[in-house]
Image (spheres, helix red, strand yellow):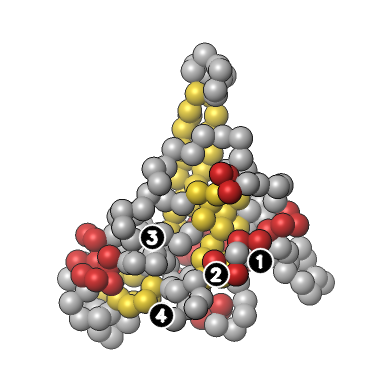
């Protein structure tokens, strides 16, 4: 079995928003909508601090379709337009989509939207047109902080790979090459409401504020 996903090292994220902009350009996402958006978590009090500035911290977290293991959006779709593929990704067949938006309402992360012009629902596809050719999703390939990595959860996050360092490079970076050591306690995911989100986030020496 395959479960494609993205891993983001939040300690390396520099909040540049390149992942969000690159995604919009690569996928022609309409103005006002995002397949990948970056949220700021905080400011939060530093443990042992006063709780007031400057004893505060924050981190940013990219949010997109989590390509869940048990996607509720697929369950509620009346036409089969939303479907889960063998590679673990959740895709939308626009030929079958009737724009009812049941999937939009079912998504616990608010990452689907109705394309008003085409009257179909859209979201992150994990750049299936690229990954099918062995390449990386555009948000991973363009990450300026080398914080995003793509891979198969069934192979372990240690196998996830990131962008090449430059045009002359032939090998993809590995998460173990660019990210500092982490433990299982440093690996998180968005709140699980029975849908089992696939994306993972590394956060070291800070408080994770998402329920699990």
Instruction: Report the side of 90 relative to 163 (left or right).
Output: left
The residue sitting at 22% across, 74% down in the picture is: 77
Mark 3 crowd level (few <14, some 14–19, many ≥20, 10 Å Cα): some
Q: Are marks 3 and 1 in contact (CB under 8 Å)?
A: no
- Give the CA distance from mark 2 to mark 3: 14 Å
- Which residue is identified by label 3? 196
Residue in front for this viewpoint, 162 or 211:
211
| Picture quadrant where residue 177 is located | bottom right
Q: Residue furthest top?
A: 50
The residue drawn where x is 56% and y is 77% is: 131
The disc at residue 23 is none
Q: Tell me how far mark 1 sits from mark 4, CA to CA.
A: 21 Å
Residue 196's spot in the image, x, y percent? 38, 60
Label 2, residues with CA under 10 Å away: few <14, some 14-19, many ≥20: few
Viewed as shown, does residue 83 lie left or right of 198? Answer: left
Q: Which structural element holds mark 1?
A: helix
Secondary structure under tag 4 reads: loop
Q: Can see residue 65?
A: no
């Amino acid at each position: 079995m395959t479960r494609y996903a993205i891993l983001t090292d939040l300690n390396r994220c520099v909040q540049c928003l390149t992942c969000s902009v690159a995604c919009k350009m690569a996928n022609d996402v309409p103005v006002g909508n995002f397949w990948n958006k970056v949220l700021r978590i905080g400011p939060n009090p530093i443990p042992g601090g006063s709780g007031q500035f400057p004893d505060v911290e924050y981190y940013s977290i990219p949010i997109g379709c989590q390509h869940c293991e048990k996607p509720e959006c697929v369950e509620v779709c009346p036409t089969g337009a939303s479907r889960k593929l063998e590679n673990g990704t959740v895709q939308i067949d626009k030929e079958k989509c009737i724009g009812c938006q049941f999937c939009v309402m079912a998504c616990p992360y608010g990452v689907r939207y109705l394309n008003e012009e085409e009257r179909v629902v859209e979201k992150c596809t994990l750049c299936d047109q690229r990954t099918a050719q062995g390449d990386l999703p555009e948000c991973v390939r363009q990450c300026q902080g080398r914080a995003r990595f793509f891979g198969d959860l069934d192979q372990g996050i240690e196998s996830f790979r990131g962008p090449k360092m430059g045009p002359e490079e032939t090998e993809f970076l590995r998460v173990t090459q660019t990210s500092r050591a982490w433990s299982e306690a440093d690996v998180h995911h968005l709140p699980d409401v029975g849908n089992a989100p696939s994306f993972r986030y590394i956060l070291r020496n800070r408080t994770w504020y998402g329920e699990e």
